[in-house]
Structure formats: C-alpha cells, structure tokens
Amino acid sequence: MLAYIYWNPSPVAFSLGPLQIRWYGLLFALPFVIGYFLMRDFYKKEKQAFTYLDTLLTYVVLGAIIGARLGHCLFYEPEVYLRDPVRILKIWEGGLASHGGALGVILALWLYSCKTHQSFWWTTDRVAILVGMAGASIRLGNVMNSEIIGKPTDLPWAFIFARVDKIPRHPTQLYESLAYLLIFFLMLYLYHRFLYKNRIIPPGYFVGLFLILVFTVRFFIEFLKEPQVGFEQNLLLNMGQLLSIPFIIFGLWLVLRKHKTVANKIQSSRYSILLIQLQKVCRYGQERHHQSSKKNVQ
C-alpha cells in the first residue's frame, strides 16, 4: 500500500520548438479567460453594455501581474531587488505574491473606473466573485512547480516533493486551492441569490466578504507552510500572515459599515410599503362608502 504521494511532475506542459509552455503559466492564464466569459455573463444578466469589458480584462491582468511581482520584490526580498532594480523586470525568474496581486487589482479597478466612469464598487463586487477561481488555479500551478511546500507530516495524503527532498509534507497548495474553489462557488451562489436579484446589498459588501474568507483561510494555512524566505524563521507570524491581517480588517469594515445609500433605500422601501397599505385602506373606505350610498338611495 502506498503510504504517501510521490510527486515529481515536469513543470513544462509542452514545447513549441524552443519555447517551453509551463503548467504554471497555463494555470495562471486560464482563470482570466474563464473569468472574462463569466463577467460577460454578469453584464448580460444585468443588462450592462459590453463596451468596456475588454478594457476591464486588460486592467485586471496588468494589475494582477504588476502588483504580484512588486509585492514579492518589496515584501519578501526588498534588499535584493532594491540593490538591483532591473531584476524586478525578470519575471521569468519567478516570484509573485498574492497580496501584491490583490492590491494591484484593486488599484487597477480604481484606475479603470476613473477612465470609464463605471461604478468602482459595482465592478469590484463582481470581480471579487471570480478571484477565488483564480487563486485556486494559481495554487495548482504551485503544485506543478513543487513550490510553497508544507511542513513535514505523517498524514496518509502527504506529498513527497521529489524535486525538493524526500520528506512527506502537507500539500498546502492543494489545501489553499480547494478552499479558494469553495469560496468561489459560495460567492457565485450568493451573487445569484442576492446581488443579481437586486436585493439591498451595500456596495463593497462582496469585496469585504471575499477578503475576509480568502485571507482568513490563508492566515491559518500559513501555519502549515515552510518559511518562504530566511527572515521568516525568527517571526512569530510569517509574512503571509502579517500581510493577511490588514486585508481581513478592511474586509470586516466593508461588511459591517453603515451605508447611507442602503439605509435610505431601506427607509424608502418602508415608506413605500406604508404608502401602499394606506392606499389600500383608503380604497377600502371609499368602496364601503360607495356601497352605503347605494343602499341609502334604494
């Protein structure tokens, strides 16, 4: 009986002449393609014009890549890249940070909204639904690269990452991938249950919920990971956990804040209900009066 999973795949999916297409690159690009069509479906359902949809994709892709690259360089190895800034451009050497990618996408969406005059929160709430799928796919890419490995364990589903060592370890990439995929399906369900049906949802609520769920999962799974860089050895919480805390706090603020527009909508809806009830009472009174008048005439 196989005690552990021996993992030693090639990181190269296929080659086109001298060009090697890697699994990580394919799995990084795939969610942008799927996300484009899902976002198109959101636009269609909500009767939004497709005018700026291609522009939105461009901004999100650039924001994610630039933000993730700068995040890695500045959060994890600043002394290396500040000493030789040209290396920041050498993205093929590896090094992307999801926290930086999240910041990059948020900034890109703000710039997109300024350029197109589209609602920032309307767009961001719907993009947030799709990011869980992207996170799940990218973590599968990490599995194919045998990177971001977990700490040693004797659990039966432990992976032996042969390209690293012969020690059974937590497949933390798969833990994250599965969690992010579940978050994606939950967000998609909530969209169809509430947001699409024009329920009274505060702007930014879905973004906040996404940040809370994703970065809380990330915070706890980090306890099972090996340190990514040397200086994390002496930290009580690693860099991934420290960077997750502000995102969780911001998410809580978005979810719990009181929003005047929503409050006005709720108040307006209450007044509308009250007005309808008063109209019914008045109509009933008029009908009763009309019936009484008829009886008196007879």
Image (cartoon, helix red, strand yellow):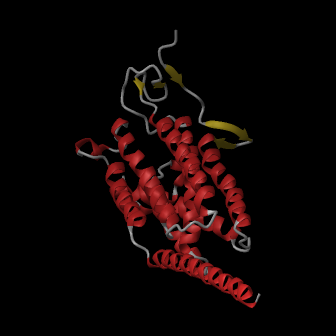
x then y, percent, for residue 156: 45, 19
| Residue extending furthest toward the right | 298
Q: Residue at x 51, y 13 (%)?
A: 2
How many numbered marks are there? 0
**Does the image show residue 173?**
yes
**Does the image show residue 87?**
no
| Residue extending furthest toward the bottom | 297
- State the residue in front, 209 or 264: 264
| Residue extending furthest toward the top | 1
x then y, percent, for residue 240: 36, 49
Q: Residue at x 70, y 43 (%)?
A: 18
x then y, percent, for residue 281: 59, 80
Query: In which quadrant is the C terminus drawn?
Result: bottom right
- State the residue in front, 84 or 75: 75
x then y, percent, for residue 12: 63, 37
Left or right for 234, reference 48: left
Q: Residue at x 48, y 79 (%)?
A: 264
Q: Is residue 176 above or below residue 65?
A: above
Left or right for 74, reference 113: left
Left or right for 166, reference 17: left
Q: Is residue 274 above or below residue 144?
A: below
Q: Residue at x 49, y 42 (%)?
A: 179
Residue 254 found in image quarter:
bottom left
Q: Is residue 5 above or below residue 110?
A: above
